[in-house]
Amino acid sequence: MKTAQELLSQKPSVSPLERHLAKPWMFWAVFFFLMASSFGLLMRYFLVGEVSFFEYKHILHAHSHLALLGWGYLLVTGALVFTYVKDAKRLQTYKVLLGISVFTTLGMMLSFPFQGYGLYSITFSSLHLISSYFFAYFFFQDLSRYKASTATRLVRFSIIWLLVSSLGLWAIGPVGATLGRLHPLYFMSVQWFLHFQLNGCFVYGFLGLLVCYLQKNGWSIPVSKKSEWILHISLFLTYALAVSWSTPIKALIFINAAGVILQVIAYYRILKPAFNQLFEGLKFPKNWIDRMLYIGMMSLVAKALIQAALIIPDVATIAYTIRMYVIGFVHLVMLGSITFGIGAFALKNNWLGTGRFSGLGWHFLALAFLASEILLLGQGTLLWAKLGFIPYYHLILFIASSFFPIGLLLIWVGLWRKPAFNEAELTIENTIKTQFYKNRKTMKSTMIMTMGAALLLLASCGGGGENQGTYTPPTAEETAKEADPKGVGEIKSVDLGATVDEALAEKGKAIVDMKCTACHQLNDKRLVGPGFQGVTNRRRPEWIMNMVTNVDVMLDEDPTAQALLEECLTRMPNQNISMDEARHILEFMRKNDLEKAGSMDAAAK
């Protein structure tokens, strides 16, 4: 059995068989990560400057789809394939699936920024989803050749959760068509996909690869099947927190609490021996690749500890109402655990470049991740404590986020370097290429069948007509005539002064800075929610105050608020704003409209 130092420092050689597929696989994975980070940086810029040629929500959809289905999916599945699949003929099958994934992800990259959810983006997303089913089918066959162990069981469940997560995507269409996009089941379907994709497929994949890596090198991970089932149960129970976001029921908080307790137990039993064997406890490693693995494992520990804090109901409510916390937590899993954890295994196995460019790029990536997490979680904590904003917070966050594409560009450039081949390796390489060309007809047939299946799926869902590819909800203005202009709530009348009360407006600005600017801008540009400019000219003061004090009822009963939710597809959280605070916010909005729109209170006249 190797020592911890020997285990960490070793760099296993890559056979030409793996290298022939690993290089293009990781090349495209990093490329999509680079594009996702570029869209993410553009999202940050929305809060710093003006962006007139893109809609924020379209960029958000492009960013999330490339991050999950481009980088995350290709990184996890690629690592699993190169760990467990050694047969040359079967690797050609995975090469076909890689081609389909690249084709569909490129389609999403080019369509989402311009149309959001529309005919083309849905088509490419459907093709990608179907190709993942083919991947699962073939990989289950390949995995069955290995003796059952903790590693293979975790990896198997990683793919199972991939399939389970897709149920949420299939539910979105029928639920939206029958119950509407405002129904809790619609939001629950979206959260189902995200939860089982991130916390299920990706996290299980990381844990499975970690255990496999240790077992291959003579270390044992004493994880019983009982511990594995504790992990499975915790995964389902922690979904309750995501449900509580759209359906605020107190019982869900307690179900989530039970889930996070079980999750801490399961993570402890798996990660504690891994830390002891790899890092001699929590000792920080010297080698840069080992540091990346350390960041990945510590991110998973931080994820479990943060979720454990959600046992307290008030903390759980804060966790999904402060947007910085939500984004920080998603990044902790996706960037911390998955990117650095599985990325380290890719580096150790020479699936990713390990040269100077790559090393520098990974350090830039780590710097960007740690800086952005500190800013997001720190600013979220300041808002919770009602201490306002960090000076120049959005600009600093934009600068910190700029290191993501810089680092990824360096990593991507490092992948262009061609490895040296000896004569024996070249012979094997030529054999692989020969097999590829012999199977080219089969590959084309597979791609055609997959695309045909997706088109049939779209046709059965009504996606074939010219005007059926996208759904355009009624605007808030079109729905306003059906609603009480004062909204739903206790506020029936508001006395407005002829001029702005500067003292009230200043208090309102402090509240808006703390609770609103993460989702709304003070101009007329949409961010997560609509811009505030002109709101007092469109909405009566009673409606505005009812919206901020009685948000859950307004979203359930007021047609205007529901129409806005249809447009934004993000439910406004209940920030527990008092009547006095709402009046302060209204006064600040009056001042903002007077300064930016040149008039105020037009809706009240």
Image (tube, rainbow, N blue to C red):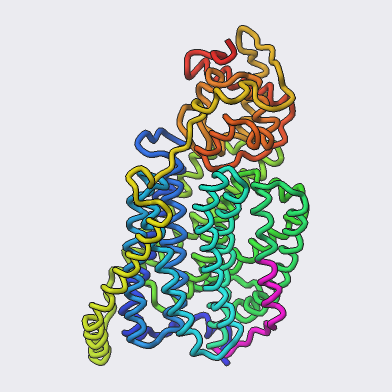
Which residue appears at 48% of the width and 33% of the height?
A: 474
Q: Quadrant of residue 421?
A: bottom left
Residue in the foreground of this view, choosing between 510 and 468: 468
Q: Quadrant of the image for the C terminus?
A: top right
* Count of marks, rendered view: 0
| Residue that sits furthest to the top in the current view | 498
Q: Quadrant of the image for the N terminus?
A: bottom right
Q: Say above or below: 226 vs 466.
A: below
Q: Name the spot of residue 531 as percent of width and height, x first.
A: 50, 30
Q: Is residue 419 visible?
A: yes
Q: Give the extent of the magenta segment.
A: 217-235
Q: Say above or below: 365 vs 388.
A: below
Q: Name the spot of residue 302 as percent of width and height, x first.
A: 64, 62
Which residue appears at 51% of the width and 87% of the height?
A: 144
Q: Say above or below: 439 vs 395.
A: below
532 is within the stretch colored magenta: no
Q: Quadrant of residue 393?
A: top right
User: 144 left or right of 459?
Assistant: right
Q: Is residue 506 visible?
A: no
227 is within the stretch colored magenta: yes
Residue in the foreground of this view, choosing between 407 and 121: 121
Which residue appears at 74% of the width and 24% of the height?
A: 490
Q: Say above or below: 121 vs 335.
A: above
Residue in the foreground of this view, choosing between 534 and 552: 552
User: 478 left or right of 352?
Assistant: right
User: 363 left or right of 572?
Assistant: left
Q: Name the spot of residue 288 as percent of width and height, x first.
A: 48, 70
Q: Name the spot of residue 508 as percent of width and height, x first.
A: 65, 24
